[in-house]
Amino acid sequence: MEIELTSDIKWVLACNASDVPENGGACVKHEDEQIAVFNFTRKNEWFATQNLCPHKQQMVLSRGMIGSTGENCEPKVACPFHKKTFSLHSGECLSGDDFSIKTYPVKLIGEKVYIGIRSTT
């Protein structure tokens, strides 16, 4: 199910909030993409990224550990296999490697989680 088209973002229903564990993640599929959705309960925030870890090309980020780092408490996810960490805001690799991941805007409407997909047209 899709909702309004705002500027260049199409909001797509990803799941129910209860489908994502507190302080954890779940994988949803939109068309051909696997997207990791994170319920960062400790920060009262939701995040979404690609599910593919670019380090070893594995679809695992939704199973990674989330936390925060640094003086500004940057929210991050760590790959469950090789512990490469990525910013949940920018997608940049926080482990000092030249990798990055795609991030998506997320909004919660009632108990439904929506992911913002940027229009390619």
Image (cartoon, rainbow, N blue to C red):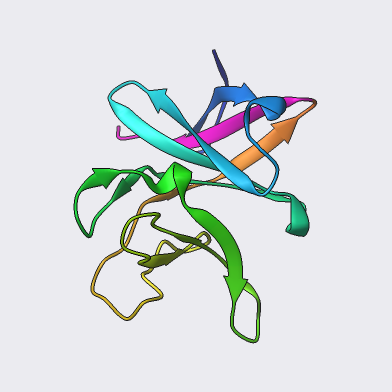
The reply, left or right, for residue 30 in relation to residue 69 is left
Query: Image quadrant for the N terminus?
Result: top right
Magenta segment includes 31: no
Of 79 and 5, which appears nearest the observer?
Answer: 79
Position of residue 92 measured from the top left corner of the image (x, y, whole percent) = 38, 68
Query: Which is the main secondary structure of the residues drawn in magenta?
Result: strand
Residue at the image point whose x is 30% and y is 35% from the top: 120
Residue 5 visible? The answer is yes
Of 81 and 3, which appears nearest the observer?
Answer: 81
Residue 8, picture quadrant: top left
The reply, left or right, for residue 25 in relation to residue 39 is left
Of 111 and 118, which appears nearest the observer?
Answer: 111
In the rendered image, the residue lying farthest to the left is 56
Of 23 and 48, which appears nearest the observer?
Answer: 23
Residue at the image point whose x is 24% and y is 55% from the top: 54
The reply, left or right, for residue 23 in relation to residue 56 is right
In the image, which residues are magenta?
Answer: 111-121
- Note whether 43 is above or below 25 in the view shown: below
Position of residue 32 measured from the top left corner of the image (x, y, whole percent) = 27, 24
Residue at the image point whose x is 37% and y is 42% from the top: 51
In the rendered image, the residue lying farthest to the bottom is 71
Residue at the image point whose x is 71% and y is 27% from the top: 18
Residue 91, picture quadrant: bottom left
- Note whether 100 is above or below 17 in the view shown: below
Position of residue 93 measured from the top left corner of the image (x, y, whole percent) = 36, 70
The reply, left or right, for residue 45 in relation to residue 4 is right
